[in-house]
Amino acid sequence: MEATQATTPAVQAPRKKEGPVFQAPKKRKKWLRGLAVLLVLALAAYWFLFRGNGANDGGMASAYLTEAVQRRDLTVTVEGTGTVQAIQTYQVGTLISGEVLEAPLEVGDRVEKGDLLYRIDPSKAQTALQQAQLSLRQAQLSYDELSAALTPSASAAGVVQQVHVRKGNLVSPGTAIADIADTSTLTLTLPFLSADAQKLSPGQSAQVTLSGTLETLPGTVESVSSADLVGAGGTLVRQVKIRVSNPGALTSADTATAVAGDVPCAGSGHFEENMRQTVVAQTSGEVTDVLVTAGSRVSAGSALATLGGSAVHTSLESASIAVENARLTCQQAQEALDSYTITAPISGTVIEKNVKAGDKVDGIDSGTLAVLYDLSCLTLQMNVSELDIGKVREGQQVEITADALPGQTFRGVVDRVSINGATTNGFTTYPATIRVEEYGDLKPGMNVSAVILGDAVSGALTVPVSAVSRGNKVLAVPAGALGENGTLTDPAQLEERTVTLGVSDGAYIQITGGLEEGDTVAYLDTETAPAGG
């Protein structure tokens, strides 16, 4: 009989009543999870960077680029942009009004400096100039007359007979200064019987006999009157003038008779001086000096005295000012007339013509009449950074390109460098003017890029610019830290060195001390380097 095993259910001990279980808020759980993740990542990074094995070192090494220190030719360059313009641009305008009589220029014409561009009707300006010239002549005449009046002078040669003034005398217009007579020759006027006088002619010789001394002198018939006069005893006579050279003692008080040819005169007569004048003052003033005495021989224009004084000085100064004012007015009138003829101020090409012959212009309101460009060469103003301005000098070559002319490169030269910088937001730039002689298809107004070619160094010892950090530090690679293919195997062996720097072309920089040719430098590859590496 098969035994049957009874199964008795186990008696379970009674459970203790459990208290409520604490559950963290969901946000706090997320924050704790995030913190835990960050800690894990930080530990992993620390281990990867500083505690890793050789495989990890290989990962760090791959973040570095290496390059041998080698020699190459460097050219310092400065780049910039700008807009090319004609070397000179001139907008033709006017300040006058009137009808345009001539306008021979046309768009595209080549004009030379001084060529006629416009001629405007100048009739009013011509009249104004003529009036100004007359005023100047009148002012100059008044000044000259006053100036001459201050030195009373002889109008003809002669001998001073009498001086009427002394130094210090005050004179007015008409005051006698001196008497002058020409006694070198004398004229004797004698009556001849009319019938006898008709036999005489000018130039005929005569014999003159002085009354009293009966001294005889040669003479010459100067003229014979054609009119009959009634002489002594009712006879008809004619006056005959005979010229006699004065031996030195004859005066107008002496009398004489004469025989012309074989014809005697019918009476005696007095000698007369060849010339007699009384010089008078032409203006008021004080006699400051007397320059002659009685008996002095003078020539035409010789000064006899001088006049002065404050009143005279004032009058002369006023006359001088009047002349200068008239001269300035005349000059202004001439300039005004000249402005009616507009000529080319520069040699160039007419690129715009806005006024033609027959049009009327109204001064400045007429605007620009024409525009000229001097296209002998183009210029470009390029703003250079204060960091690069020391690299730019006059005479340096420039390479120029334009997006509008793909594939073409133009040559220019630095014409001048201004020291008048412009500062914006604490950064200063300086304008450099570039001259482009052979500009080909370039046109004024085109935007271009320019590269200034600065100093060039042949065979410079160089490293990449990226290999230099903190001003003048590089990482030198010992031979033991390089693999067979020249890659870095052990970054821990890198050596920081201080170097002396030279010129740079932007990609490479010259090393003048601290490294030798054949050395190798390492620098981080910014594209593949791990963050924080």
Image: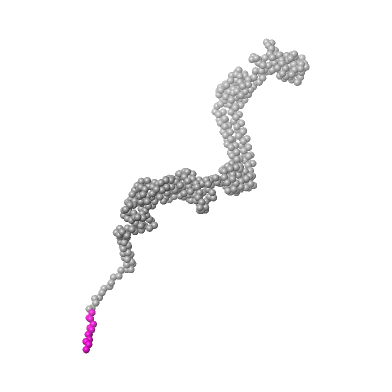
Up-down relation of residue 153 to residue 72 (above or below): above
Left/right of residue 378 with respect to residue 216 in the rendered view: left
Left/right of residue 482 with respect to residue 413 in the rendered view: left
Up-down relation of residue 351 to residue 139 (above or below): below
| Residue closest to the eye, 284 or 503 | 503
Q: Please tell me which residue is depicted at 75% across the width and 20% down the height of the picture.
A: 226
Please name the colour scheme applied to the rendered image. one colour
Left/right of residue 250 with respect to residue 519 in the rendered view: right
| Residue closest to the eye, 413 or 140 | 413
Q: Please tell me which residue is depicted at 60% across the width and 24% down the height of the picture.
A: 152
The prevailing secondary structure element of the residues shown in magenta is loop
Quarter of the rendering occupied by the C terminus: bottom left
Residue 144, quarter of picture: top right
Seen as rendered, the residue at the extreme bottom is 1
Up-down relation of residue 88 to residue 271 (above or below): below
Q: In the rendered structure, which segment of residues is drawn in magenta?
A: 1-12
Quarter of the rendering occupied by the N terminus: bottom left
Can residue 212 be seen here? The reply is no
Seen as rendered, the residue at the extreme top is 213
| Residue closest to the eye, 517 or 205 | 517
Can residue 216 be seen here? The reply is yes
Q: Residue 83: where, in percent of width, then height?
A: 50, 50
Residue 235, quarter of picture: top right
Up-down relation of residue 426 to residue 224 (above or below): below
Q: Please tell me which residue is depicted at 74% across the width and 16% down the height of the picture.
A: 192
Q: Residue 388: where, in percent of width, then height?
A: 43, 47
Left/right of residue 503 with respect to residue 340 in the rendered view: left
Instruction: Inspect the magenta stretch and tell me whether residue 100 lies in it.
Output: no
